[in-house]
Amino acid sequence: MKTKFTTDTKLESEIAYFENINLKLESGDIIDSFKLAFKTYGKLNADKTNAILVCHALTGDQYVAGNNPITGREGWWSRMVGPNKPIDTNKFFVICSNVLGGCAGSTGPKELQNRSDVAYGGNFPSVTIKDMVKAQSLLIESLNIEKLFSVIGGSMGAMQALQWAIDFPEKILNIIHIAGALKHSAQNIAFHEVGRQAIMSDPIWKNGKYFENNEVPERGLSVARMIAHITYLSENAMHRKFGRKLQSRDIISFGFDADFQVESYLRYQGKSFVERFDANSYLYLTRAMDYFDHDETFRKNIEFSHNPNNHLKYLIVSFTSDWLFPTIESKMIVNQLNSLSREVSFLEIDTDKGHDSFLLEEPQLDDVIKGFLTNNFAKIDE
Amino acid sequence: MNKINSIRKDWSLIETLIAEDRKILDIGCGDGGLMEQLENNRNAITHGIELNRDLAANAIARGFNVVHGNAELDLSQYSNNSFDYVILSQTLQAMMKPKDILSELLRIGSKAIVSFPNFGHWKIRLQLLISGKMPVTESLPYTWYDTPNIHFFTIKDFLNLCNEMNIVIEKSIGLTSKGKQFDISESITGVNFFTHEAIFLLSYKNFEPIKIKSSKKVFAKNSVIAN
């Protein structure tokens, strides 16, 4: 396999091209060529033992730290990744790629179909978490890294980390799995479906062909984001942040304006999301999460794909107020790993910030990630 | 002996009971102090369970395999005989169902190490006798209404329970309140009176395995699968 690398100056991102690769997807469809947009931080050491793959969540991208040219803001995990940060780029070589099906430079519905000048749109094949991880593994291979020290992710990123442990245990030393689960629950699928329906019932969506007229189904996509955003918070956090406070007014309007701060906040979230995210990509990626299910198969997969000398370590973290991926889901993973005597650590962090806690200020998360990485790296370095 | 010294002493005695290169589960592992000691001095592979969130977080950050959880709820997830030793240091008296915990220890581990403060120590007996109030001592420093220690028992009680449960006491170490160490099994008279803290190495009675007639070939095959 020969991979071509270029730098996209507009995206401020590296692009890896995999040509004539015939990537077979879980659906049975084949993508003959694809590209992944990725960023790296820090330096790969001479022995190539310090590489960490960070996997982004549903609406994340490869811009973990530093400037994100699409939003003009700091990277989504810049409080976690960087020099002297918990994932210390003075010590580790951090890689993050935009997932297959994403919309920040990797092959996805908004990119042109191979050998044509038409975007995929709704013709993009269905991708799964397993497919994303397969594509990532090809990227890691093409960077000549045999073994990743760690794969780290929250939410959809946690799903990818778990998939790495299932599919490529021999290529990693540990995973840090934050706010994830063995499966996407019925409730989670339900919320995603409401979001997708919002997009698909926007008349501008046009079966995914909105790009032909240079249009965006803004209303549908922003409603989808607003719904999803509620699921990322907790009632306590919303109450603490907004309560029933009014927005730029002293009395209620007796109308349907954004009277309340919480409404104004959600509208802002919806609006700013539309500017950075592709509606079709949102459909595909939410679907990939829905299809994620290792409830029945995880135990067998771990039991039989690992040889006894494989010292893969797992750090599983959940948050008390996360009702989208509640602690009980994390505990199911811990339970299965313990029953197989695997090296697993688990912590439930006490916070009211909900599912989004992993992106926010949580000192205990910082301490645990930093310590886990540093001390386990010292062990392999001995 | 103060609490810290007493724990250190406890750990060093536990260490003497453990062979090299074994797999260990430490229940109530705190921030991993004993695990660290056993990794360093016994080359052990260690796992821990800790109920306290901050202690569990510290232990994980120090690189230990620690699950933040409640032993009384979470032990059932471990498979039979998955550890060489399961350690319960100074917490049996704080368990809701000590008997169930004891049988869980020996289900999960080939051997269990249990240490506890002896409620039959003469100072405790004397306090209750003279003051008529629930004793408060260095090793049991809590008042009755806010103590985590909900099941007080003496060495005699413990020995009776082990007997009832067909548990074999492989080794037993007693400590006086001055930290003097002796072998409980060899000093029968007054042991329940003078022992301040006790440490036991336990296992189940070894039953002769039932031998099934079979050709060696099958066994060889099975052993390959088992490995």
Image: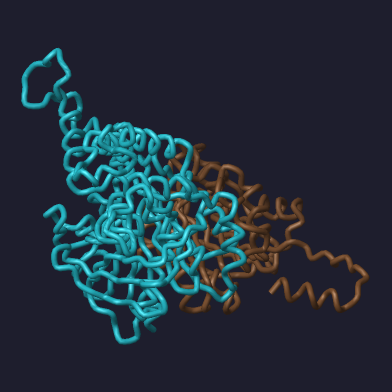
* The quadrant where residue A302 appears: bottom right
> Percent from the top left, x then y, of residue B67?
47, 56
> Percent from the top left, x then y, of residue A4?
29, 77
Q: Residue at x 39, y 76 (%)?
A: A141
Q: Tell which chain the image draws in cyan.
A: A
Q: Residue at x 53, y 42 (%)?
A: B150
> Percent from the top left, x then y, of residue A64?
23, 61
Name the outermost residue toward the right: B213
Q: Looking at this view, is B5 or A197 the one in front?
A: A197
Color scheme of the displayed model: by chain
A166 shown above or below B53: below
Residue A49 in view (yes/no): no
Q: Residue at x 14, y 61 (%)?
A: A67
Instruction: Report how many numbered discs are placed on residues in the image.
Output: 0
Q: Tell which chain the image draws in brown.
A: B
Q: Looking at this view, is A61 or A117 the one in front?
A: A117
Q: Is A374 situated left or right of B117 in this image?
A: left
Q: Is B143 situated left or right of A340 in this image?
A: left
Residue B207 in view (yes/no): yes
Name the outermost residue toward the bottom: A46
Q: Is B182 situated left or right of B138 in this image?
A: right
User: Which quadrant is the C terminus of chain B positioned in?
Assistant: bottom right
Name the outermost residue toward the front: A116
Q: Looking at this view, is B217 or B131 the one in front?
A: B217
Q: Looking at this view, is B91 or B106 the one in front?
A: B106
* The quadrant where residue B171 appears: bottom right
> Percent from the top left, x then y, of residue B204?
74, 61
User: Which quadrant is the N terminus of chain B positioned in?
Assistant: bottom left
